[in-house]
Image (cartoon, rainbow, N blue to C red):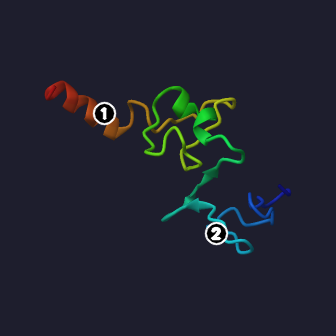
Amino acid sequence: MNGLMPDCPKCHQAIDSQTVTCPRCFTVLKAYGHPGIPLHRATGAASLCLTCTYHADDTCTYPQRPYARECTMYHDRTKPTPTTNPMTSSDPLRTLQSWLRKKFP
């Protein structure tokens, strides 16, 4: 990565951080329909799940788990935990699901 702009993970060309698709190799860099969300990709043969915080703590609900090669929620479990985990009990959907399970077992 150079000092100001990130590099494309495929062709390593410097790109603007808001770029959705690399103009050189056309690699998709952001989640479809959500240009503010980065799309993480596995770089080796292993899936992203093997090193993801959300897979390790069993809060991942991604349908491709445990074989995901691309993911918008990926967080490397060797790095500090994110300050806000969207899959915790403060998540409105999780709260509703929990309430429904209690009301209608």
Indicate whether 88 appears above or below 35. above
Q: Residue furthest front?
A: 45
Q: Secondary structure at mark 2?
A: loop
Please provide percent x and percent y for residue 3.
Answer: 85, 56
Disc 1: which residue:
95
| Image position, residue 16 (x, y; %) | 72, 66
Q: Amino acid at mark 2?
A: Thr
Callout 2 crowding tier (Cα within 10 Å): few <14, some 14–19, many ≥20: some
Q: What x and y, as percent, mark residue 38?
A: 60, 55
Of the numbered discs 2 and 1, the one sitting upstream in the chain is 2
Q: Quadrant of residue 9?
A: bottom right
Task: Say which element carries label 1.
Answer: helix
**Image-based side of 24 in relation to 42, left or right:** right
Quadrant where the image shows the C terminus: top left
**Within the image, what quadrant is residue 103 found in?**
top left
Return the residue found at the far left.
104
- Residue 52's tag is none
